[in-house]
Amino acid sequence: MLNIITDAINNRQEISFTYSGIDRVAQPVAAGISRAGNNVLRCYQTQGGHVTAGHTWDLCEVSLMSNVKNTGQVFDADPPGYKRGDKHMTKIYAEI
C-alpha cells in the first residue's frame, strides 16, 4: 500500500481510499514516519466525506487506510497552503 501512495506522490496522481469508514479522494503530498513512529500520509482531500466538516487537509495513518487506489487523475498545481517538509513527520519517504 505504501508503494501505491509514494508512486502517486512522485507522479502527482490522486488516490482514492477508505479511512475512518469514509470513502475519500485526495491529492497525496507527503508520506513518511510520524512522531509516534507510524507510517502516515499527508493529503489534501478533494472528494468524499469528512469526520470534521470543512476539513480538507488530513494526516492519515497508513495502516488504517483501505481500498487504496490510484485514480489516474493528475494534479499539476500544489494544493492550497502546501509547504514542503511536513513538521509532523520525522522521516519523509516522498513528497511533491
Image (tube, helix red, strand yellow):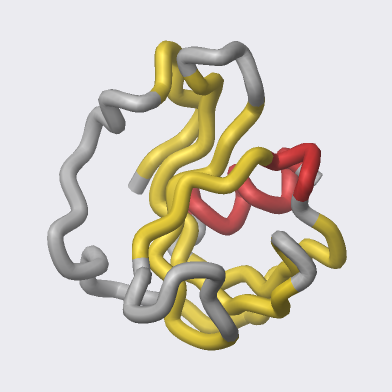
- Left-right relation of 11 to 67: left
- Residue at 44 percent across and 82 percent down: it is 46
**On the image, which quarter does residue 12 sit in?**
bottom left
- Left-right relation of 55 to 26: left
- Residue at 51 percent across and 71 percent down: it is 26
From the viewer's side, name the closer residue of 64 and 10: 64
From the viewer's side, name the closer residue of 6 and 21: 21
**On the image, which quarter does residue 58 sit in?**
bottom left
- Left-right relation of 61 to 81: right
Q: How many marks?
A: 0
- Left-right relation of 69 to 81: right
**Above or below — where is 96 with respect to 75?**
above
Rendered location of residue 56, percent (x, y) = 36, 70
Rendered location of residue 52, percent (x, y) = 45, 69
**Above or below — where is 83 with respect to 88?**
below
**On the image, which quarter does residue 16 sit in?**
bottom right
**Above or below — where is 33 with respect to 41?**
above
**Above or below — where is 46 with respect to 11?**
below
Rendered location of residue 86, percent (x, y) = 29, 32
Q: Furthest-right residue in view? A: 67
From the viewer's side, name the closer residue of 13 and 32: 32
- Residue at 78 percent across and 69 percent down: it is 21
- Residue at 49 percent across and 49 percent down: it is 10
